[in-house]
Image (cartoon, grey):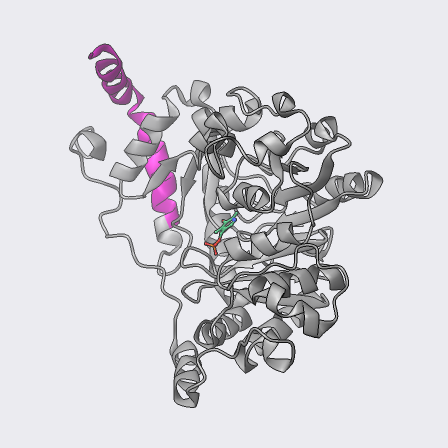
Amino acid sequence: MIGADKLALIGGIPVNSKPRPVYNTIGNAEKAALMEVMDSGELSGFVARAGSSFLGGPQVRALEHAICDYFGVKHAVAVNSATSALHCATHALKLEPGDEVIVSPYTMTASASAILFAGGVPVFADIEEDTFGLDPLAVEALITPRTRAIMAVNIFGHPCRLAPLRDLADRYSLSLIEDNAQSPGATYQGAWAGTIGDSSILSFNRHKTMQCGEGGVLITNDDSIALRAQLLRNHGEACVEDMHLEDIANTIGLNLRMTELEAAVARVQFSRIEELTKPRVRLAQRLNTGLSCIDGFIPPAVDEQCTHVYYVYCLKIDAEMVGIPRDLVAQALTAEGFFTRAGYLSPVYLEPLYQQRICFGSTGFPFTAHAAPHTLNYDRGSCPTCERIQDHELLMTDIIYEPYTEVDMDGFVEACAKIIRNRDDLLAIHRDRTSSP
Ligand SMILES: *Cc1c(COP(=O)(O)O)cnc(C)c1O
């Protein structure tokens, strides 16, 4: 018994010895849609000129149409990545240099850099314990006369506190952007996540639930946001004259166009959104049930007003109760055959870009364009909840996709139990490591 229970980290037999399967949901329908475009010879439908080809080819439009229908919104603008879609969202704000946008620090780097590219400066507000999204109280405390927008991130598959954030945006006349790359199909008070903000984005990159290679979409009910997004996507400055646009602020463009190939694949993947989400939810719920019986392992919270789509599985551990440091738990779980990461990403403000305030050129633009740059706080300690969760509490694993099964989920729970049973061995490793020079 003792021998069989030996931790894989110190040479025992792992709970799971199967290799990690690839997440591959590309089937015959995706292949057929792709080949249809290949056969047509029209691999992109965009021309940077006012007129019908300004908005792209038939696949891009059909994808946009399907997304509008599903989410019940007026406009969808398909671009070559969700990062580009975030650029569309911040570009549409028509910021003056140095304007502030309040954003979550617990996100993928692009949420904040899209603000800088639009000439604004990110102001990071702390997150709250359960949804890992912006804490509305922290946001309100940071609103100043220079604040123009809030960028909320629905992280890990769960919406953040969208109603109070919407309320703040309305009360202070701010725009609300939802970075919904990780949570398409989640709901908040019965509404789709991504439809409460003035604009939101979704992603089709290879890590997301739906994939097409690279791709992203901005959705909005606001005509002027949609137009600015379309102009940024397709060389707007060359089109405004023929479009008779009077207000040319932020009509300068790039080439962020999605090809017909990606749109065709994205369209099929999007038609399967529920089918692709279901296994994640089912497997995550199995983990939730199993982990709730293990002291110190805290399954992800699901707010009663929300549904969770489990882009990844993030649990918290109470290291004191478990009696083992979090990072060692992650290593032990990985050794047991379930890849587990200690934390997600460092709070964005700890990146060198913010620590040194060097962005465009070498003298600090756009931070220097802010009216009172010394009031911008990117210091360690500025979002203590985010830092504590990232440094000590969060464990992330992405085993909640097929072909993983319920048996594998039970294996993960068993691996957690095994770690607790072998606490003394792990603490010995910890002592060895911390005492060596
Ligand atoms: C994946 C992701 C993005 C960027 O998506 P891309 O399509 O890779 O550009 C932005 N924000 C969040 C929260 C993400 O998870």
Which residue is at 53% across, 36% downward? 106
Residue 297 drawn at (x, y percent): 46, 31
Q: Nearer the viewer, residue 389 or 106?
A: 106
Quadrant of the rendered image containing residue 132: top right
On screen, 243 above or below 201?
Answer: below
Q: What's the magenta bit mostly, secondary-structure-wise? A: helix
Residue 239 drawn at (x, y percent): 64, 70
- Residue most toward the bottom? 39
On screen, 238 above or below 114?
Answer: below
On screen, 276 above or below 374?
Answer: below
On screen, 69 above or below 42?
Answer: above
Which residue is at 69% across, 50% downward? 93
Residue 404 drawn at (x, y percent): 36, 56
Which residue is at 36% across, 42% downward? 412
Residue 257 drawn at (x, y percent): 51, 68
Asked whether 248 falls inside the magenta stretch, the response is no
Residue range corresponding to the magenta coloring: 409-437
Asked whether 433 falls inside the magenta stretch, the response is yes
